[in-house]
Structure formats: structure tokens, C-alpha cells
Amino acid sequence: MYFDSHAHFDDEKYNENRDSLIREMNENGVDYIINIGADMKSSQNSIELAKKYDFIYATIGVHPHEVEKMTEEDIKALEEMAKYEKVVGIGEIGLDFYYDFSQRDKQRYWFERQLELAKKLDMPVSIHSREATMECFEIIKNSGVRKGVIHAFSGSVEIAREYIKMGFYIGVGGVLTFKNAKKLVDVVKDISIDNILLETDSPYLAPVPVRGSVNNSQNLKYIADKISEIKQISAEKVCEITTKNAKCLFF
Ligand code: NI
């Protein structure tokens, strides 16, 4: 019933209970999880999770926080890793000018290189964009990549519409349930449910009423409920359509 399009269950926060939690989620209606790589090691770990669990798939890629020491060898290694059949996308990749953990020039360069790889392999991308909205949009536009998801979307209604026109989905997670979420609520109101993917970004961004806890995919129900309330359609329908959307993008 639920499709979590963005989660990090390889994170060390799950070291104590990873296997039992993963089984629990699957027993409670989480039918698909995309486990997202954020550096070379977590990309490999995502593949290991996908090998171990039927309902988990992997994306591979290097997050803007981690590109400072990225090399051309890493691009080759990612290309090699992408051959495994349960690798369904490149990500998360993008720009983060809020934390600026990596130099901006390096962020731009390795974002472009990884988009090139996605284009070459004809794979969708999972995009991280923070305080870099227009530049991120322009880089994607110029790359020619036309399928993916803007994870934890934080932009305006206008830019959401532009991304959708370009073939992208809008990733909506726990932030939608936060008190200060007006901008994202407006986006969800404006766009069609056909353009939305549900995500948790576990272990981060747990929704209200479990905000602040270590997140997991069962909490997608709170996000589905909120979308149901905003769009006046049943939560069941929200899950059905967003699952169909995610399958359409990744499978
Ligand atoms: Ni993430």
C-alpha cells in the first residue's frame, strides 16, 4: 500500500534494530522502499539492502555534502554498480548552498557529471536541492535528464510547475505536516496528485505527531493523511496513486 521513494535505512541510527524494523515495516503495509545512496559507501550499502530484501530497491550517487573528494574513478565505480538489476536510479545528487559542506564549484561539477551518468544509463535521478533552487533547475535543464524526483521539495508553486513540465515528480515528506509548511501546502494544493511521490527521508524529517523521532516508512500514513486533507481525496486513493507514480518512475 505504501511506497517510500526516499529513505536511508543503511544509516547507523538503525544499527540496533535494522532487520526487525525492516520486517515490521513490510508487515505493516510498506510494499516498496527506495534506499538512497549518499556517498560511495552508502551506495554500496543500499545495494546490500536491496539484495537482502525483496521489497527494497537502491539508488546510487554522491550527495552534494560528500563531493569534496569525489573522483572520476568514483563515476566509473557508480557505473559498474548501476549494472545490478535492483539499482533503479542515480541519487541523491544536487546542490546544497545552505550548509555549503563542499565548495560550490565542486558541487556543480559533480552534480553535472552524475547527471551525465544518469543520461548515459537512461536512469531517473533523485535530486537534493537546498537554497539553490534556480541554479539546480538550470543545471538539470541543461543536462537533458527528463525523469526523476525533486526530493523533499522546498520550492515555489511556479518552480514545481516547471519541474513537472520537464518530466519530474515532486517528492513530499514529513515537512508537509509541520506548522510552518504553508509554502509546501500551497504546492500540494496546486499540483496534481499524479505528480507527487511520497517519501520519508528516514531517519530524518519524521512527521507530526512523531516529529523529532527516528523516522521510518510506516510514518508515510501521516503524510498521506495530510495530502488527503489538502486535496479532499481519500488517504487510500493518495497511496494508490502515489505508488503508481513511483512505480512508473523507478520500475
Ligand atoms: Ni535523503
Image (spheres, rainbow, N blue to C red):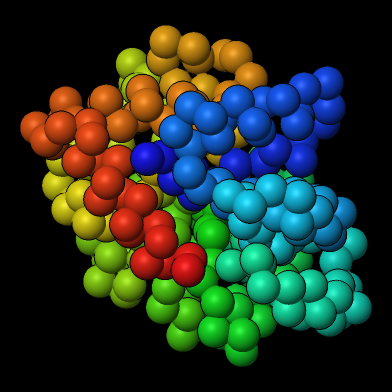
Nearer-the-camera pick, 57 or 79: 57
Q: Residue 166, percent across and down?
A: 32, 74
Residue 194 position within the rendered picture, expressed as x and y whole percent measured from the top left? 22, 56
Observer-nearest of 227 and 175:
227
Q: Residue at x 20, y 41 (%)?
A: 237
x then y, percent, for residue 39: 79, 55
Q: Quadrant of the N terminus?
A: top left
Question: In the shown orientation, is residue 112 left or right of residue 5?
Answer: right
* Residue at the far left in the pictured view: 232
Farthest residue toward the top? 209
Rendered position, 168 above or below 201: below
| Residue 240 visible in the snapshot | yes
Q: Residue at x 14, y 47 (%)?
A: 190
- Which residue appears at 67% of the width and 26% of the height? 21
Q: Is residue 170 visible?
A: no
Q: Residue at x 41, y 61 (%)?
A: 247
Left or right relative to 250: residue 77: right
Residue 155 versus residue 158 in the image, above or below = above
